[in-house]
Image (cartoon, rainbow, N blue to C red):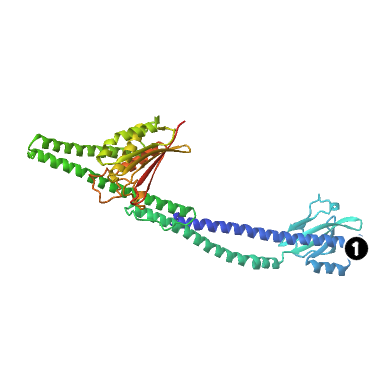
Amino acid sequence: MITRSLLFRQLFSHVAIIIFMALTLSVSVIYFAYQSDNGDLAIRVRNIAAFFSEDLKGGRIPDREWELASQATGAVFWLEDNDGQIIQGSPPVDLNAESYTIRNSVDYSKQFLFSTEAQNAVIISVPVLIGEEPGRLLAYYPLRPVLLEMIIRSYFFPFIAGLAAAFLLALLLSQKLTRSIADIASAAKRFSAGDYTSRTRYTDKDEIGTLGKTFNAMADAILHIQQTRRNFFSNISHELKTPLSCIKATTEALIDGIAVNDQERTQYLERILAETDRMSRLVHDITDTEQLESGKMFIKQERLDLGALLLNQADKIELLLKKKNLSLLLRLETDKRYVLGDTDRLEQVLNNLLSNAIRYAPSGSRIGLLLTEENKWLQVCVSDQGEGIAEADLPLIWERFYRADKSRNRSSGGSGLGLFISRGLIEAMGGTISAHSQKEEGTRFMIRIPWLE
């Protein structure tokens, strides 16, 4: 219905406020104009009474001066005694005497001013002394048409023009408001129908523009989540397909009796075991990813010796270093060793970073493992002398399943979740992790964790 339309309600409220203010102003203008005119006349009548005070002592005002006073004020004057008997002059013939009768309690000695409206006129009464007796000088002042003409000319027509302009302005403002809201509502409707590219065009710097920007940001986030989810399931299927295919093919080969002796049979079984381990690690990584995203990851808060942890990790990778003809440079450049964190999870992060460094480092190069101190932070740096990561790829390496080297096959790399999990674990322990790299100059990962006294 039109009465429930936002445009109609906005327009109605604007116009109602404008009309209310205009009517209030109209009444005020007429009232003050009337009061001003009435007040001016009262002052004139008092001045005339004061001017003729000497003549009134004789009981009468000269006719010539009486006529000049009437012409100067535009009023009809007459004198009455205390009993209401007319002494000089005469009121208009059509004036009802009861309409200007003054209450008996009036004290004429106090210059009391009385005015009343009767028959579209104003009657002003000023106490005077006529001879030695109290009386009053009255002035009959009709409401002049010129006052109404002045109000109409000076106010009514400008009011009509202003009301029309205000109505048009209210209409434009209401249309702009409803148009912007309708645009956001339309974009939301298309988005809810499955058009995830739908965006609102209204992004001005007002509250509704902020709503439009918020909607667009929300839509971008949802679209990113949808895309990430599709990529996640696609990558999971690929990650599982490879080991499952290998396990199936190897098992079928064993069933067909392709292994001619125990040594070959053992090799096939070891291959099945290796692929099973890969699947187990992938499932473990997926579980960690889900727990990090849902906030359900349990992180122990215990005092641990970070220097001892690095020495332990160096021992663990010794065989991997020898296998690839790599050397390790381990330096502990601070006597601050203790942090608050989870030993197992921190080992998981270090193992991932060192495994990546070994995987991408060229034979004969060196892996760096450095512990330093900066302000209230302990810093662990893991570096290699490999090919490095392109600058455009650096912000993306923390994404799930992202691989900077698109040509690297999945059997030679990890699950693609390691860095995503590592960042989540370090941040859960109150630290930060960052990467610095250039092509052909190697890569350096920096972990920063607050140290304990």
Q: Residue 113's image quarter?
A: bottom right
Task: Give x and y (percent) for residue 5.
Answer: 44, 56
Task: Give x and y (percent) for residue 189.
Answer: 36, 53
Task: Give x and y (percent) for residue 322.
Answer: 26, 38
- Residue drawn at x 8%, y 36% is 261
Q: Amino acid at mark 1?
A: Asp
Can the viewer see residue 207?
yes
- Residue drawn at x 81%, y 61% is 45
Point out the residue furthest to the top here. 303
Q: Residue 428's image quarter?
A: top left
95 and 262: which one is in front? Answer: 262
220 and 366: which one is in front? Answer: 366
Can the viewer see residue 96?
no
332 and 148: which one is in front? Answer: 332
In the visual, does 146 lie left or right of 444?
right
Q: Which residue is mark 1?
A: 55
Vertical comparison of 302 with 185: above or below: above
- Residue drawn at x 25%, y 47% is 234
Q: Residues within 10 Å of mark 1 (few under 14, many from 20)?
A: some
229 and 317: which one is in front? Answer: 317
Q: Residue 411's image quarter?
A: top left
Task: Give x and y (percent) for residue 410.
Answer: 24, 46
